[in-house]
Structure formats: structure tokens, C-alpha cells
Image (cartoon, rainbow, N blue to C red):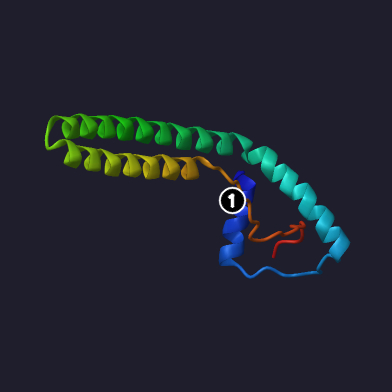
Amino acid sequence: MPTARHIWDQLLVTKPTILRHLDVETSHQAFERLQEAAEQQGKTIYDELVAAHRERLAREREKGEYAFAARRRATLRIGLPQVRNHRLSLLEQEEERFRVELERRAQILPEMAPLLLVRVEGGAHG
């Protein structure tokens, strides 16, 4: 990780010398190997992010359920039966939209997009 960060920093501040480009097959093979390595290296971070996301959604779901229950109790206490039923119907629709949105946000679609693939070769400094 420190080496990768150092190389990235150097790419940002100095102009690299491009010696050659890889052919399509070789670059495809290199990409496959690097993607597998990146997935292995990033798995712990990815798992932590997924866990944090799920915890956040669970807290949101809990808060939402509490709020909807409180609103339902308040709605049941006041108003004419027809008005109360209409308000309960609207509340149920809102609660369903809330659940659908939470479900949509619970869908995790990981994506890794490489920005740059570089082969670094040692050379004379000077």
C-alpha cells in the first residue's frame, strides 16, 4: 500500500517515460490478474463498508417504524372515522414507499473501475 501510494504521488508530480504499450492479449491477462488481486486486497474494506451500510439502514428502518407507529397512534385518536381511515390509508402508502426505498438502498452492487494500469520498471536515477 505505501509503495502504491508513493507511485501514485509520483505519477501526479512527474511526467513518466512511456517505454512501450502492451499488446491486447497481454494487457487483458494483466488486467485479470490485477483485478483478482485488487478484489482480494479490498475484500476487508468492502466487507466493512457493507456492514456499516447495513447498520445504517437498520437504524433508519427502526427510526422509520417508530415514527410510523407514533403517527398511526396519533391518527387513531383524532378525527371522524372517514377522515381517520383516509389518513391511515395515506400513512400506509407512505410507509410502503419508505419500505420500498429502503429495499432499493439495501441492494448492493459493487463496482470496481480501474483508473490506470501501469507497469513500473526500475531504472537509473539521475
Q: Is residue 23 above or below residue 76?
A: below
Residue 82, given in percent of the width and then of the height, sits at 19, 40
Residue placed at 75% from the left, 70% from the top?
18
x and y, in percent, of residue 109 in the image: 59, 46
Q: Quadrant of the C terminus?
A: bottom right
Give the image location of residue 101, x and y in percent.
43, 45
Residue placed furthest toward the front = 82
Left/right placement of residue 121 relative to residue 8 reads right
Residue type at mark 1 is Arg
* Residue in the picture at 12% in, 37% down: 79
Q: Secondary structure beneath disc 1?
A: helix
Q: Can you tell which quarter of the image residue 97 is in?
A: top left
20 sits to left or right of 126: right
- The N terminus appears in which quarter of the rendering? top right
Please tell me which residue lies in front, 63 or 51: 63
Q: Quarter of the image holding residue 2?
A: top right
Question: Dot 1: few (<14), some (14–19), or many (≥20) neighbours within 10 Å?
Answer: few
Q: In the depicted view, which residue is nearer to us: 8 or 60?
A: 60
- At a point 17% along the width and 42% down the height, the residue shown is 83
Residue, disc 1? 5
